[in-house]
Amino acid sequence: MSSDISEEYLTEEWWREEGYENFEDMPVPDWHLEILKERMARYEAEGTTWTPWEEVHEKLLEQLRKLNNVKALKD
């Protein structure tokens, strides 16, 4: 989907045409729920660990600082 079409889709209130006051009132199809259940089961089975954004951000900043220090020493 092009970005123009995506933006139009998100900004239009198409759910009103379907008779809903708010897009959050629309029912979720059962097959969507099944996919979510499958993904959650896979996530739980794999024991995936997540790193908070703040930690990732700090590590990236640290790496950039080190690179900048190396560049400064070479100059």
Image (cartoon, rainbow, N blue to C red):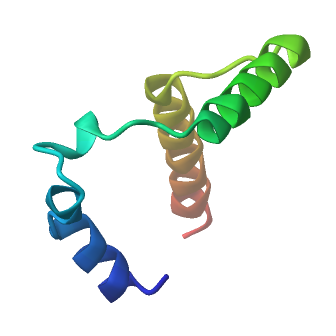
Q: Is residue 57 left or right of residue 71?
A: left
In the rendered image, the residue lying farthest to the right is: 46
Residue 34 location, quadrant: top right
* 39, above or below 11, in the image: above
In-front residue for pair 28/43? 28
Where residue 60 sits: x, y (%)?
Answer: 55, 42
In the rendered image, the residue lying farthest to the front is: 19
Q: How many marks?
A: 0
Identify the residue at horizontal 67%, vertical 39% (top origin).
31
* 16, above or below 54, in the image: below
In the rendered image, the residue lying farthest to the left is: 21
Identify the residue at horizontal 55%, vertical 32% (top origin).
56
Identify the residue at horizontal 34%, vertical 84% (top origin).
5
In-front residue for pair 48/10? 10
Where residue 73 sits: x, y (%)?
Answer: 58, 57
In-front residue for pair 63/50? 50
Identify the residue at horizontal 61%, vertical 39% (top origin).
32
Where residue 57 sits: x, y (%)?
Answer: 47, 36
Q: Is residue 23 left or right of residue 27?
A: left
Where residue 42 sits: x, y (%)?
Answer: 84, 23
Q: Is residue 69 left or right of residue 16?
A: right
In-front residue for pair 20/67? 20
Quarter occupied by the C terminus: bottom right
